[in-house]
Image: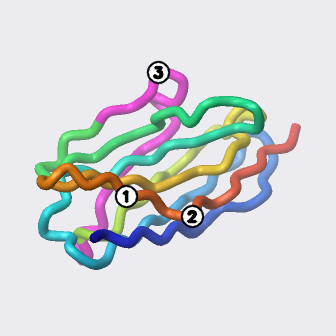
Amino acid sequence: QVQLEESGGGLVQAGESLTLSCTASGSTTNIVYIAWYRQAPGQERDSVALIARGGHTTYASSVKGRFTISRDNNAENTVYLQMNSLKVEDTALYYCNSRTLQGGNFWGQGTQVTVSS
């Protein structure tokens, strides 16, 4: 089992920045990757960014160049999502997700990001 805890959401204006944090605990040695997803009201949950155990990263086209996913150098089980140049359409509930070698799929509770115009 892996437990995920997100933090860092809030209300910002368009063009501003925000950093989300996700801390994993439990059976973290089995984690293959940690990812961020987001879900806006009435829409599906979509992938935003992912960082694999080896450090490889991927991004949704809508956030590439604006968002950066990274791992804490001193705490590999903590992953950040640096969000710059935020847009109103980035407003959503942001979830942390992890997959394990055994096929486990775990989610955090989510943290709200609201971008006002």
Q: Position of residue 103 (x, y in %)?
A: 20, 49
Figure quadrant of the C terminus: top right
Q: Quadrant of residue 70?
A: bottom left
Gap in angstroms between the C-alphas marked 1 and 2 = 10 Å
Q: Is residue 57 above or below residue 31?
A: above
Looking at the image, do the residues carrying marks 1 and 2 touch, with CB atoms under 8 Å apart?
Answer: no
| Residue range (magenta) | 58-75
Q: Residue at x 40, y 39 (%)?
A: 49
Figure quadrant of the N terminus: bottom left
Gap in angstroms between the C-alphas marked 3 and 1 = 24 Å
Does 68 appear in magenta? yes
Gap in angstroms between the C-alphas marked 3 and 2 = 25 Å
Q: Is residue 23 above or below residue 69?
A: below
Mark 3 or mark 1, earlier in chain:
3
Which residue is the site of mark 1? 106
**Camera-nearest residue between 33 and 61:** 33
Task: Please name the amino acid that badge 2 sits on.
Answer: Gln
**Camera-nearest residue between 111 and 2:** 2
Q: Residue at x 79, y 57 (%)?
A: 11
